[in-house]
Image (tube, rainbow, N blue to C red):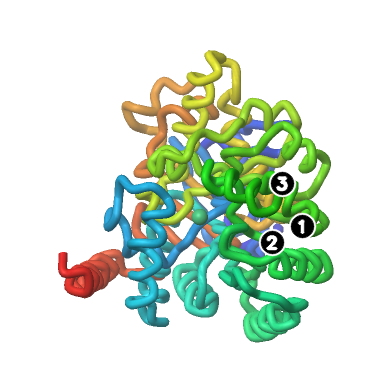
Amino acid sequence: MIYCDTIIKGGIFVTMDPEFRILNQHFMVIDKGRIVNILNIDQLGKFQSKKLIDASGCLITPGFINTHSHMPMTYFRGLADDLPLDVWLNDYIWPLEAKMLTTDFIYDASLHSAAEMIKNGITLTNDMYFQKECIADACIKAGLRVIVSKAIIAPEYSGDGREFGEELQVFEALYKDQALVECSLAPHAIYTCSDDVYSSCARLAAEHGWLLHTHLSETQKELEDCLKVHGKRPLEYLASLGVLEARCTFAHGVWLSGKEMELMEGKMSAISLCTDSNLKLGNGIAPIKEMLKRKLNLSIGTDGVASNNNLDILEELSTTAKLHKAINHDPELLPAQDAFALITIDGARALGKEQELGSLETGKYADLLIIDIQNLQSQPLYNPYSQLVYAIGAEQIRDVMIAGDFVMKDRQLIYLDEAELIITAQAYQTKISQELKL
Ligand SMILES: [Zn+2]
């Protein structure tokens, strides 16, 4: 007899492994947080598990990977909609952040965001914000995997970045026993950070293996200002500062030219497509067709709730897939299987984590979803990818497991009290409304 922590049986395994295998009549063995194997059901008798999970009538998929978020902005949802990015940032978000941001605010909003992400099937988010310890603590409480960041806004900075590196090393030492937490360097954007910020972050990121997470080429204004100030397009400018020597997550990439995309070919760096945010802020549509042609690393980010306005990454994926078919008059562009990869294995690859996450394979972390398909909108089921991208809603996600541990079961969060989170959000709403005299 072979002993293990958990066995999941029944259901259809959508593995996202290199052969994109879809397995019926199989069961998954999980031990010490990792997938031991996915075997044919006739071998089940050899195993004894502490927990036996029945996933009949469900799909079992890898957890979703969100490559760009701002967790603490959750309490700004719907606060300043229908505005251009520069007005939205300068007149609303930044003044409000200057007044409202306390460590309690960041922790509470991140907790809310973590709960919302888990309910939407997100098992890892690559976050960009200040007070990374508060965000890390909230994610640890929720059981959510996270890459927090040393966010930097420093337009006048001149230095070698030593203090950025020291800060992250202190953080890593403090959180060394927290397997769910990692950190990155996150210069906010080219219009809020100096040359020295980017060149030192690039050097530190390459040296320490940290991710460099930044906004890039989000608006036409950013592109035009960059051409005016630096005489280069945004990615040409960043490449001249050595940024492409590191593994970067570039959020948005809406205004990238063919030449800029060529700079990314064969590099570790990835784009985080944030379609809903780009649409809502009127920033444009990323040139995905050409990105795909050039085999760039692509992934999906929800961006912050203040600009999205939700964390429903399945909806984000569905919109992205359909939008690009429509504008390119090409229904064959981004077929469902390739689209689903964007929030699973490609998301993992974008963050350099494809050896550990993003598919259901032996040795990888057991970060997975059990999605109920015994309902009208999921039947009949000919093709699970089609169902996942075009039909299934987040409310069908029944269970969420991260590192072998259920963080949601039967739609109930295990480590967080949803009712309490709602009351807390409403209390902050009152405070923010009073502050803004709404
Ligand atoms: Zn963003």
The reply to whether discs 2 and 3 touch (Cβ–Cβ < 8 Å) is: no
Q: Secondary structure at mark 3?
A: loop
Q: Amino acid at mark 3?
A: Lys
Residue under pointer 1: 243
Above/below status of 34 relative to 379: below
Dot 1 surroundings within 10 Å: few (below 14), some, or many (20 or more)? many
Q: Which residue is mark 3?
A: 232
Find disc 2 in the rendering and name its residue: 212
Q: Nearer the viewer, residue 226 or 94?
A: 226
Q: Is residue 264 above or below residue 133?
A: above
Q: Residue at x 67, y 42 (%)?
A: 346
Mark 3 C-beta to ligand 1 under 8 Å = no
Does the image show residue 409?
A: no
x%, y% of residue 371? 45, 42
SS type, badge 1: helix
Disc with the residue nearer the chain's start (2 vs 3):
2
Q: Is residue 156 above or below residue 343?
A: below
Q: Are marks 2 and 1 in contact (CB under 8 Å)?
A: yes
